[in-house]
Image: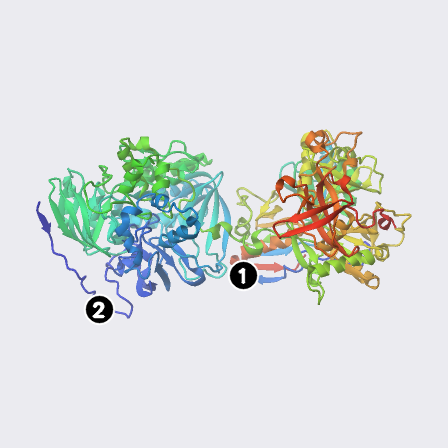
């Protein structure tokens, strides 16, 4: 990749500093801003949903979810994000949009959203209780499991959340402009459980 | 008539010498089920020091200390004591705490005692014992129901300034602190299979049954202890004390991994799909623990709900039944058994049901003398006679209390027996029971009407319950403990089964025997003094009679006319008695009379907890631009535009006000170059083979003909023909467009496009998504803008006027390979560009552009200057796109294509929308060039009266134009295009303005557009 002469800046640069917050000696919630994620929105062209699923299967061995699920892993995952619409999320330095374009051609309209969303990773034993203060959906293990995703509200802020594992850990994506407000909700919600904010990564 | 009088010591015996220096608790008993005698707590009431124990309520601690007088009544300022031991309390309403945490109208019966609690009585002056307004009770005849409708009628102008303030001061409850609440509140949601409301015997059994089935259970209990009436009665369950059974049940539930027990939590409402509850997390502590809220609002979403809310005891309606010392019999047992407090030294018990005997027995067991048992029923069982005899109480069957004595505390009661003989008893406690009313409030929150049962003399839950709800325990109208345990177990098991679990009914333990026979007694006739029905609102039986005489006979009228059942207790102790009296006066049955509607909340809920964290800056989320942190460093002043915070202007030291700053910024754009973050404009990525088709249908003008690499200004109409929004759309590829919208309409335009493509024309192959947040977009405007842009664009991209003329767009790279989009568009009318980069680089790009532009005089500008520039150019914005203007009104009529169909085209042809006298967009300038214009002023001809009938339109936007050196404006004026050069008045009655203005073209600066094409 070309060396760009501009520095990137996180929308959380002024509001999320690594360290410990809230109840001393407790680590109920661990928060980390995700960096280096490539996020591309895929919207199937009319009538091409089936062909798109086949192409995804052939190219990456992943089953494009038709329900609110996430397929894949940290390197590349497809998240259902609406009717005939997915978010492809990848780590690393490659150009995700380009590689999707190469393999999917005109089966889907692709839109880069890498900068449109901020993603936080949340984990820790009290994550569910913290999230319950903003999300009205049921995150109990009987109702929401690793691989599940949901488009919902946190407080009054639209988010997409997905569960990574049952420790539990989740990732939550928010429109960039609202990232500060999301933190403004999250930290007070979790402070009674003790919060560790990790350096972005 | 003979009078039997018994002696009574006027002074209460001095308590045993206090062991500590703490004030004694002369009415504290040796045993208590729910109080920790080892843990002493200090508190004050009206400045006097007292002590109590953990587990006490303020009410029980006051009673233990011998305090009877706790408040003054609402209207008559009569001395009042403690009536109940629960949330139904109408009398003992106090202010808790002081300073910023002062909380008025708190029921002493539910306020949990804590160390250092400060409580103050309300509605009295100068003191509780001597209250000047107490004279009200002597003029009671004119203060009857509806008095203020009748008395304070004339003159009408006095109502707001004289009468209402006077009434509010005289009547009324406590004072709010007036300070910011120092605590915080929060909201949370929980989901479960079975929600059990109430943790009395029925609720505990229901929760046990559901938990054992494996269901996720939430058990809510309003009290700080589980157990309900089990704490208040001396009962046996399964051959041991009920308290032992309670301990085991509680332990089992606590150990269950999927059972959440919420104590101090009132479920206050049944809403669509969710129940609302308030958990009082820190109300029982001086200050909430660190990081804990004062209260927490729970939204509980459950598959099934079991309501085990129990029942509320009814007072009896007899003369002067409100003296401090007259108490509900069930509350007396609660104070004796649970709190270990004797509410008096010598009691009379008055009841119409079998509970009376239990009260006599419990008082006697606690060592309280019982002077008499007055049973309203002519016949009583041998069991009752036996209990009365054992307690040494005189049993008076078929008798009534017809009079009470005492002023600040009860001193005695007169009983009239069946033969008409009066018996005078000295007593300081009168325990009364008129039977129990099932707590059916929540069953009615979806509109179901409670059903009157003559047999049980009670309103029972309606047959039409909120979806998923079942009722168990005393709330069903079956109050016996054995029935409560059985119905709770059954309802809990059934709820779990319906939620999808395999269940079996748990074993139901045996209980000791009891009976709850009752014979209604709705009022005592022929007594002396006011017979109160609603203690909190000072509504007496005579007021109900008055309402009936005056025609307010329907239950809802009765409530509004007399205020029966209003205020903090919502008639928990008074409604049924009031309805029964109205039924009697109307000579109808209670079933025919009906009941008022129960609505949420069941119990008072603080506004703070409903707001949760959403207060102050957190009232709603704020959307920040990519350059927000940079703008903050520059000292920008921000303004809310929708959810966004945008830089309004960038003041420099020495600039007196925003106008000076905005003028400087606008001048810099006209003379040099300015930078403005325009990322907030809506950006929609529209792709697909039919993208151009969609645009042609939603825009009034043509887009299919737009070449790749070009931008076009578009206007879209609503279906009704009015303008919806405007903006530029760029064609990035044959099948890809980038639409921009106004900041305000970004979401509604997206929604509109989704509706069009998903519902109107699903056959179109087009995909859309908002990219507003993906791109940081900076306007670089002014004669020197090209030089600034050239400073960042990578080599190989030609942006000369020839290669990149006005209304061009390109995808290119800047600053060494960063992908970017450049648009040559202009809102200011100057040579201008908008440069977009992925949002994370927006901050750095702004800094880089500032650096490059420094020698060129670059100036950041905010939306005030933006407004100045667009008014100078006559560009319509939010003030003109008001939803009431057509394209023709704002000078865009010619954009409406005649060669294609589009949304709004048909409706825009309506006569009213094409009328020639519609107000249309014009420019204005003051005749006196030194004068300042004001937006909102109305256009009037020069020589007409200042009447709405002469109104010809109004001023929509104004600005001080640095380019012209005077104020200018835009407005909507009838037949405006024909009236250029005419002088009219801009009449502004609100701010006292009346100016002559000249009508001019809306485009006041560079009308030929040379500057933007240069």
x 45%, y 60%: residue: B288
Q: Where does the image place residue B377, in percent across and percent down from the top left?
A: 17, 38
Chain letter of the residue carrying label 1? A
Q: Nearer the viewer, mark 2 or mark 1?
A: 2
**Residue behind mark 2:** B17
Q: Where does the image place residue B654, in percent across and percent down from the top left?
A: 71, 67
Quarter placement of the N terminus of chain B: top left
* Residue neighbourhood size for the residue with mark 2, other residues' Cα within 10 Å, grouped as few (<14), some (14–19), many (≥20): few
Quarter assignment of residue B18: bottom left
Report the front residue among B315 and B858.
B858
Report the front residue among B739 and B717.
B717
Image vertical order of residue B281 relative to residue B516, above or below: below
Residue that sits furthest to the right in the current view: B802
Residue B891 visible to an observer of this rendering:
no
Chain letter of the residue carrying label 2? B
> Which label belongs to residue A22?
1
> Which label belongs to residue B814?
none
Image vertical order of residue B513 relative to residue B80, above or below: above
Query: Are tags 2 and 1 found on a single chain?
Result: no
């Amino acid at each position: 990749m070309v060396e760009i002469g501009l520095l990137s800046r996180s929308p959380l640069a002024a509001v999320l500093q690594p360290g410990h917050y809230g109840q001393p000696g407790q680590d109920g919630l661990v928060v980390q801003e995700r960096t280096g994620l490539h996020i591309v929105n895929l919207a199937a062209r009319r009538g091409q949903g089936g062909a798109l699923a086949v192409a995804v299967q052939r190219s990456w061995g992943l089953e494009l979810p038709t329900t609110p699920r996430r397929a894949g892993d940290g390197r590349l995952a497809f998240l259902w994000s609406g009717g005939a619409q997915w978010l492809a999320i990848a780590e690393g330095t490659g150009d995700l949009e380009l590689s999707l374009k190469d393999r999917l051609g005109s089966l889907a309209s692709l839109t880069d959203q890498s900068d449109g969303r901020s993603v936080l990773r949340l984990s820790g034993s009290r994550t569910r209780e913290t999230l319950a203060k903003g999300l009205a959906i049921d995150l109990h293990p009987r109702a929401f499991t690793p691989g599940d995703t949901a488009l919902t509200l946190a407080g009054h802020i639209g988010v997409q959340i997905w569960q990574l594992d049952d420790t539990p850990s989740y990732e939550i994506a928010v429109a960039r402009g609202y990232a500060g407000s999301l933190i403004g909700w999250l930290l007070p919600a979790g402070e009674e459980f003790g919060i560790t904010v990790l350096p972005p990564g | 008539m003979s009078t039997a009088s018994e002696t009574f010591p006027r002074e209460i015996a001095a308590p045993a010498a206090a062991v500590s220096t703490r004030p004694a608790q002369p009415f504290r008993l040796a045993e208590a089920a729910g109080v920790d005698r080892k843990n002493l707590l200090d508190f004050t009431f009206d400045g006097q020091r007292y002590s109590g124990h953990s587990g006490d309520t303020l009410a029980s601690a006051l009673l233990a200390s011998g305090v009877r007088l706790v408040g003054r009544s609402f209207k008559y300022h009569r001395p009042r004591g403690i009536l109940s031991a629960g949330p139904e309390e109408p009398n003992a309403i106090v202010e808790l705490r002081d300073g910023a945490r002062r909380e008025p109208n708190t029921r002493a019966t539910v306020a949990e005692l804590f160390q250092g609690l400060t409580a103050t009585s309300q509605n009295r002056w100068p003191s509780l014992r001597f209250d000047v307004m107490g004279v009200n009770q002597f003029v009671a005849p004119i203060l009857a129901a509806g008095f203020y409708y009748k008395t304070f009628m004339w003159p009408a102008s006095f109502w707001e300034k004289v009468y209402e303030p006077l009434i509010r001061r005289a009547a009324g409850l406590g004072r709010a602190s007036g300070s910011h609440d120092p605590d915080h509140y929060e909201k949370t949601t929980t989901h479960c299979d079975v929600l059990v409301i109430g943790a009395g015997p029925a609720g505990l059994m229901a929760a046990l049954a559901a938990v054992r089935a494996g269901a996720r259970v939430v058990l809510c209990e309003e009290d700080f202890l589980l157990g309900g009436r089990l704490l208040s009665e001396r009962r046996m369950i399964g051959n041991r004390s009920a308290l032992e059974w309670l301990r085991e049940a509680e332990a089992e539930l606590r150990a269950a991994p999927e059972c959440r027990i919420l104590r101090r939590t009132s479920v206050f409402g049944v809403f669509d799909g969710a129940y609302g509850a308030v958990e009082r997390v820190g109300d029982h502590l001086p200050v909430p623990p660190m990081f804990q809220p004062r209260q927490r609002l729970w939204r509980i979403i459950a598959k099934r709900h079991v309501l085990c809310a129990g029942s509320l005891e009814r007072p009896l309606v007899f003369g002067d039944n409100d003296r401090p010392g007259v108490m509900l019999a069930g509350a007396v047992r609660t104070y004796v058994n649970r709190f270990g407090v004797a509410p008096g030294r010598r009691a009379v018990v008055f009841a119409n049901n079998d509970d009376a005997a239990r009260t006599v027995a419990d008082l006697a067991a606690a060592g309280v003398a019982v002077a008499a048992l007055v049973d309203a029923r002519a016949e009583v069982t041998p069991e009752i006679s036996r209990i009365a005899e054992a307690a040494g109480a005189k049993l008076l069957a078929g008798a009534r209390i017809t009079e009470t004595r005492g002023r600040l505390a009860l001193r005695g009661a007169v009983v009239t027996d069946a033969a008409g003989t009066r018996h005078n008893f000295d007593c300081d406690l009168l325990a009364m029971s008129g039977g129990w009313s099932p707590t059916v409030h929540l069953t009615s929150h979806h509109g179901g009407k409670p059903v009157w049962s003559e047999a049980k003399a009670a309103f029972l839950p309606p047959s039409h319950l909120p979806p998923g709800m079942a009722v168990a325990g005393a709330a069903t109208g079956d109050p016996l403990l054995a029935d409560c345990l059985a119905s709770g177990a059954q309802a809990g098991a059934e709820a779990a089964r319906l939620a999808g679990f395999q269940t079996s009914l748990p074993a139901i333990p045996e209980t000791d025997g009891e009976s709850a026979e009752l014979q209604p007694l709705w009022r005592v006739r022929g007594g002396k003094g006011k017979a109160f029905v609603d203690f909190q609102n000072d509504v007496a039986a005579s007021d109900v009679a008055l309402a009936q005489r005056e025609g307010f006979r329907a239950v809802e009228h009765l409530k509004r006319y007399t205020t029966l059942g209003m205020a903090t207790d919502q008639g928990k102790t008074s409604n049924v008695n009031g309805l029964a009296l109205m039924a009697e006066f109307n000579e109808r049955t209670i079933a025919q009379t009906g009941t008022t509607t129960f609505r949420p909340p069941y119990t008072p809920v603080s506004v703070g907890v409903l707001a949760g964290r959403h207060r102050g800056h957190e009232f709603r989320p704020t959307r920040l631009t990519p350059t927000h942190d940079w703008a903050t460093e520059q000292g920008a002043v921000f303004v809310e535009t929708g959810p966004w915070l945008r830089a309004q202007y960038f003041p420099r030291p020495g600039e007196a006000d925003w106008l000076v700053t905005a003028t400087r910024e606008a001048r810099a754009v006209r003379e040099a170059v300015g930078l403005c973050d325009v990322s907030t404009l809506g950006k929609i990525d529209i792709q697909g083979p039919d993208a151009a088709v969609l645009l042609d249908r939603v825009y009034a003008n043509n887009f299919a003909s737009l070449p790749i690499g070009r931008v076009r200004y578009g206007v879209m109409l609503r279906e009704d023909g009015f303008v919806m929004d405007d903006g530029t759309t760029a064609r990035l590829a044959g099948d890809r467009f980038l639409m921009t919208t106004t900041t305000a309409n970004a979401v509604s335009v997206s929604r509109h496009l989704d509706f069009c493509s998903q519902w109107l024309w699903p056959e179109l192959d087009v995909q859309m998504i908002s990219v507003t947040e993906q791109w940081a977009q900076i306007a670089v405007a002014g004669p020197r803008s090209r030089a600034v842009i050239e400073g960042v664009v990578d080599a190989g991209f030609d942006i000369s006027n020839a290669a990149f003329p006005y209304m061009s767009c390109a995808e290119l790279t800047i600053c060494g390979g960063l992908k970017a989009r450049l648009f040559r568009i202009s809102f200011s009318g100057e040579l201008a560009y908008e440069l977009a980069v992925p949002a994370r680089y927006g901050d750095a790009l702004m800094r880089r552009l500032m650096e490059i532009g420094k020698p060129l005089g670059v100036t950041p500008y905010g939306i005030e200057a933006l407004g100045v520039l667009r008014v100078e150019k006559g560009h319509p914005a939010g003030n003109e796109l008001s939803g009431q203007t057509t394209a023709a009104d704002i000078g865009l009529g010619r954009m409406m294509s005649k060669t294609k169909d589009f949304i709004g085209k048909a409706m825009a042809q309506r006569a009213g929308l094409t009328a020639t006298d519609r107000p249309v967009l014009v420019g204005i300038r003051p005749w006196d060039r030194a004068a300042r214009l004001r937006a909102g002023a109305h256009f009037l001809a020069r020589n007409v009266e200042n009447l709405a009938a002469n109104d010809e339109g109004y001023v929509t936007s104004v600005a001080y134009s640095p380019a012209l050196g005077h104020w200018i404006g835009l407005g909507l004026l009838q037949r405006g295009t024909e009236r250029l050069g005419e002088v009219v008045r801009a009449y502004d009655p609100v701010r006292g303005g009346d100016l002559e203005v000249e009508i001019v073209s809306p485009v006041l600066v560079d009308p030929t557009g040379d500057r933007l094409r240069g």
